[in-house]
Amino acid sequence: MKFVDEFRAPELIAKAGEEIRRLAVPKRHYRIMEVCGGHTHAIYRFGLKDLLPANVELIHGPGCPVCVLPMGRIDDGLALGAQAGFIFAAFGDMMRVPGTHGSPLEYKARGMDVRIVYSPADALKLARTNPEKHVMFFAIGFETTAPSTALTLMRAKAEGLHNFSVFCNHVTIIPAIRAILDSPDMRLDGFVGPGHVSTVIGCRPYEWIAEDEGKPVVVSGFEPLDILQSIVMLLRQLRKGEAKVENQYKRVVPWEGNRAALRAMAEVFELRPYFEWRGLGFISQSALKIRASYAEWDSEQRFSVPGVRVTDPKAAQCGEVLKGVLKPAQCKLFGCECTPEQPVGALMVSSEGSCAAYYNYDHRKPVTIASAASV
Amino acid sequence: MATPATKIRFSEPQIEMAHGAGGKASRRLVEGLFAPLLYGSNQGPLGDAAHIQINGTRIAMTTDSFVVKPLRFPGGSIGELAINGTVNDLAVSGARAEAIVVTYILEAGLSTEILEAEVRAMGLAAEKAGVLIAGGDTKVVDHGQADQMYITTTGIGRLIPGVDISVPSVRPGDKVLLSGPIGDHGITILLARGDLDLEAELRSDTRSVLPLVQALVCEAGAGVRWMRDPTRGGVATSLNELARDSGHGIVLFEEKIPIRDSVRGACELLGLDPLHIANEGQFLAIVSSEHADSALQALRGAPGGEEAEMIGEVREQPSGAVLVTTLYGGSRLVDMLVGDPLPRIC
């Protein structure tokens, strides 16, 4: 398959692995955070940890939109969606995320009209074909998905489609990275920068990480070779004592980002003064809300939202895992009370959640098998 | 047999879509509720078909329901699936389908034209598979109480001589054979629903696998230890069941697993693992290592088996799990299907 197989070529991957081993100074321990849940997933799915020396440690970052959403927001969304005459539309990733009284899928089994959509435009289509219903799209995601929500809202306004609204949970990546760096228990050497978010925001917004914090950032693609190459680039900078922002994912990410997408976001969204993140707490100016000029299509401005705050189950350590302080398996619930089938926390549900990736691909993997993998 | 005191081991308060998806939740329902109440507790692992003894003759018996949506899709339709599905469940239990009875549940308002087309499709598929349709039953429910039509087929089959497959006979060193490319059916249905603006040249793989099973068995005989058609839940779920039931590990070689580019492409886009996607015309076989090469050649020599591959082997580790290794030395576990990415696939 084009643009995929090239980045999974065994000989190139082997070479990148060798280069990493050559660059990593043996007596030093490297802690590199991959910010994006998509990277976490790829690292486990492709077994990339097997290719890294023990002193190059990957720390999973907060870049999983489903995971960082506090349970109260899910409860609020479900409370709205459960009203008579409503259709609750969301991405498939949301469907098994537990709220206080069950996940959207469980609500569906009890009779709520829940639909999986693959884009906000599909939710708008639902609104057109179900004029007697109100379609509420439960929007989540970083800057990756925010532009498509914005364009959908612009379209709804242009069409004058009034049976459609968005329950907006869009968040922004930079404040989350800042919160991680401000956290006293984190000692990071550098970042594998998010790929998809950067297609929209570009690479400039990361410059402060290099300039002010002195940590290198390499924006990376999602194939095995992309990720390994990004680690090589980070290690090279560290070796030379440099800290700059580099773009490994040039084939997709323009340095300046996507202007049209940013314009659409600016038209529809403004920053919330603050927003609650699971594990990270309240972070100021870290999320998007729908502007007053689109109030008609904003579920929160149009309907009354319970606005519940729910604390995570006490025993679950989602917050620590999200911040990279704990590895998934170090959580007390991991693999026993909390599994992808019966998740306690969202990190076990989302395809981008580090617990799900770790549980599905890695945790029962015997060490000996990894090294004796070939026939 | 169950008494009123018989305890079930199923604690979920209601049935969810996932309980019908063929993955982990289905297994919990079958093992936790159906088996204790209907089946007793001292039975071995549950297979694709039951083998029962009548007047000294062992026969195989199975049943399967079909609720696929849409009814027709590139490469097949519900009627064809309903015959092939039951023929295949018998085939991979080591039996040749002899007779099938059919139940139709029809929604009032269903057009005769649609029904006729599906009944014709069943007739053709039965003829192709060499199986007799011996009887049937029809029920009609109110409009809105079912979605067009559902079909249940129940089949009996004669055991193919010289075949003795069972989970306990599987041992480390055995090889995993796969009859052809995976994921065609699931992805075809997904695209046929038209919810995604994606198109691909792809057809369901629905067919009787009996000729291929016979070719394999004829060559390898008692070297064939276990077979399964990886329908809902895909190859990953079937092999995880085997791993769990046998206590052995299954190691797959990623580069050997045949997958069409269009299926891979759709899976990459949608974040699905082809190993979890349903098939309706493929089967997995565990074959002893000394028979594996000749068995593979026999499969490849049979019509429709050209793309068969040896995709992995049974090892002691990781016990009870399935591990996929890549050419570049990385590896990952694949679990059973969790949840239901694709309801009503068959």
Image: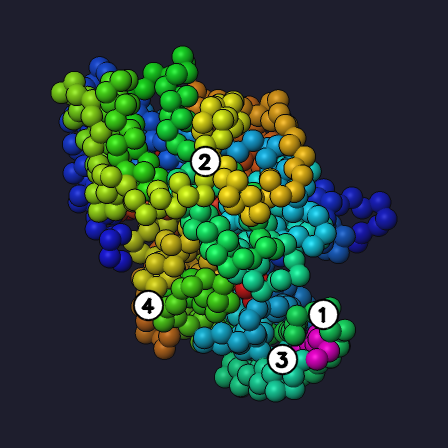
At a point 52% along the width and 40% down the height, the residue shown is A292
Secondary structure character of the magenta stretch overall:
strand
Residue type for callout 3: Ala
Are the residues at dot 1 and dot 3 in contact (C-beta closer than 8 Å)? no
Query: Is residue B102 rendered magenta in the image?
Result: yes
Q: Looking at the image, which residue is at 33% across and 68% down?
A: B307
A289 falls in the magenta region: no
Q: Nearer the viewer, residue B16 or A195?
A: A195
Residue A148 image position (x, y, % from top left): 42, 49
**Of marks 3 and 2, the one in the foreground:** 2
Q: Which residues are magenta?
A: B101-109
Which residue is label 3 attached to?
B99
Which is nearer the eye, A372 or A22? A22
Residue at point 34%, 58% (across, down): B265
Q: Chain of mark 2?
A: A
Give the residue pinned by disc 1: B144
Which residue corresponds to the image point at 32% horizontal and 74% vertical from the top-left?
Answer: B301
Question: Is residue B218 visible from the viewing direction of this image?
Answer: no
Question: Which residue is under mark 2?
Answer: A270
Asked if marks 4 and 2 fall on the same chain, the answer is: no
Locate residue A321, reporting x and y percent. 47, 25
Q: CA distance from mark 1 to mark 2?
A: 45 Å
Give the letter of the chain under mark 3. Answer: B
For mark 1, give the secondary structure. loop
| Residue placed under numbered mark 4 in the picture | B307
Q: Chain of mark 4?
A: B
